Image (spheres, helix red, strand yellow):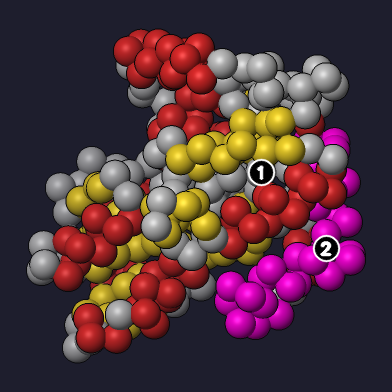
Amino acid sequence: MKKNFKFFTTFMVMAFMLILTACGSSETSGNGDGSDKEKKTLRVVTDAAYAPFEYQDKGEIVGFDIDLIKAVAKEAGYEIDIAHTGWDPIFVELEKKIADIGISSITINDDRKKTYDFSVPYFLSTNKIMVPEGSDIKDAEDLKDKTVAVQNATTGQEAVEGLLGKNSSQIKKFENNNLAILELKAGGADAVVADNTVIEEYAKNNPNDKFIILEDKDAFAQEFYGLMFPKGSKLKTDFDKALNEVFDNGTYAKIYNEWFKVDPDVQILKNQQ
């Protein structure tokens, strides 16, 4: 998922600073580098609108990513406070060192590495295409004369821009993937391009919508999610070690199986380290 979108207003940055001040920092490290050993509770930010990875259920933030970060933080010896901020604010808070960790199906890529640090990979993903049953779209090439809905500032958007052009009027950009799917459902788009697990889960849980998922390995490369930290964060070492421990002790496989009902390929993740 998700490519950094850097056009943030000064107002947004000031707003987050005010929120942090209002909440206080007596428990959270707040410095983003993990150097203050007296303050063990870390601020973790996410965009809880991306089921099954992170979403809200009766006011509680749940999902695969949420269970994983809780397990990894426990292994690393930290308490965490998870906040739903929305997508773009994740990057603001981490760049300004207001938050300590971001977890939100964030794809590791070279562009983001210029501004942030990442953990070792914890999930393999790829973009796929969701279309209505009976669609004449069969692969990514068929999208070139269609209207495609995507979540703004994501690798899905980037992939579609590679096919249709960066400023193509055929690309409809939405704040989150749920809105992109609603546009497809309403007939305002011919397809949605997004992370495979997210749209596969939606199609499985909403059979009456009669959406099908298309894979195109030639058009969409493999992506790996990672925990994202402020640049230079000393937390990276602790969390890399903890992630490898949950890979090795079976905790990762247990969480993965609970959410996806299949066993993960842990070795492919370790091969990326």
Question: Residue 108 lies in what quarter of the image?
Answer: top right
Q: Residue type at mark 2?
A: Phe
Q: Depth check: 226 or 252 in front?
A: 252
Q: Secondary structure at mark 2?
A: helix
Residue 4 is at least partly visible in this image: no
Q: Specify whether 149 is left or right of 96.
A: left
Q: Which residue is mark 1?
A: 227
Quarter-of-image position of residue 181:
bottom left
Q: Residue at x 19, y 67 (%)?
A: 184
Using the image, determine if residue 166 lies above or below residue 26.
below
Do the numbered discs 2 and 1 sit on residues whose CB atoms are within 8 Å? no
Checking the image for residue 247, the label placed there is 2
**SS state under label 1:** loop
Q: Which mark is residue 90?
A: none
Q: Is residue 221 left or right of residue 243?
A: left
Q: Position of residue 1 (x, y in %)?
A: 48, 52
Can residue 36 be seen here? The reply is yes
Residue at (42, 26) in percent of width and height: 6
Q: Is residue 73 left or right of residue 47?
A: right
**Residue type at tag 1:** Leu
In this view, the residue in front, 254 or 79, is: 79
